[in-house]
Amino acid sequence: MTEGIDGVDERIMDAALDRILQVGIRRASLEDIARMAGLSRITIHRRFAGKDNLIEAVLARETRRMLAEVTAIAATTADVDAQIEDTMLYVLLQTRIHRLVTQLLRVAPDEALRFSTVQGERLVSIGIEYIVGMLGHARSAGLVDDYDPRPVAELVARLAHSLLLTPGGGSVDFTDDDRARAFVRTTIVPLMKHGITRPDEEPSNDHVRHHPGTAPRPAP
């Protein structure tokens, strides 16, 4: 739900988010949300057709807010390598410190896994489409090679989601800023600049202009 959102919808989603952060998703009733929003339960039903749709809208909005921050970071970064590096580090950080993640673990730890898996499907889909759009604009501007961005977008979005589910246990400690940056610089940056190449295929740099570029924009 992104089109046709008005002030009342925002008010409802704000109240829903506040209640989720207080008691978790399962215990956040429509009655409580309606009371916090100063509206009737019927109004919420008319606008969102039930609690499940409302929760999905809230989570999608939070994801888009994070991606808006990603765009803002890219817009203030000098070149494409730095854009990729800084925006990916921001996303990976958010998988650990975002208030929905940390607060759910506090107030409803049993729901945290369900949030990361069931609701995670929607979040991954939004992330994939955003990255596809971002890489498409970067390709048009000559900032990355000419390749199919969807497989790369899939890998990057699923990497972020996997770190949400399992932040530790691998050879890279993503809570260490220097190690996380080194990982992104040596793996994610080349991947997003050149795409996935076959063993018999060398990445072509002909399409890439070696100068500072404008920030890639997401798909509208």
Image (cartoon, grey):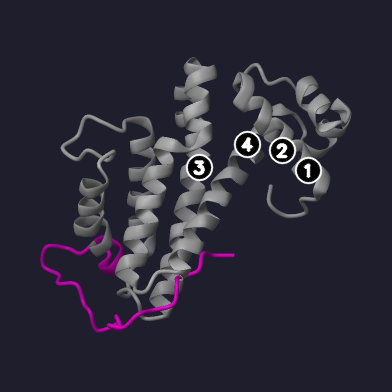
First reached walking from the N terminus: tag 4 or tag 2: 2
Q: Is residue 173 left or right of residue 48?
A: left
Local secondary structure at mark 4: helix
First reached walking from the N terminus: tag 3 or tag 4: 4
Within-10-Å neighbours for mark 3: few <14, some 14–19, many 20+: many
The part of the image, by quadrant, that contains residue 11 is: top right
- Residue 208: within the magenta? yes
Please name which of the two marks, 3 or 2, marks the residue nearer to the observer. Answer: 2
Residue beneath disc 4: 56
Q: Are marks 4 and 1 in contact (CB under 8 Å)?
A: no
Q: Which residues are magenta?
A: 191-220
Q: Is residue 15 left or right of residue 66?
A: right
Residue beneath disc 3: 123
Q: Position of residue 162 (x, y in %)?
A: 34, 37
Give whichever of 17, 198 is nearer the camera: 17
State whether residue 164 appears in this view. yes
First reached walking from the N terminus: tag 3 or tag 2: 2
Residue type at numbered disc 3: Leu
Residue beneath disc 1: 9
Residue type at numbered disc 2: Met
Residue sitting at the far left: 200
State whether residue 52 appears in this view. no
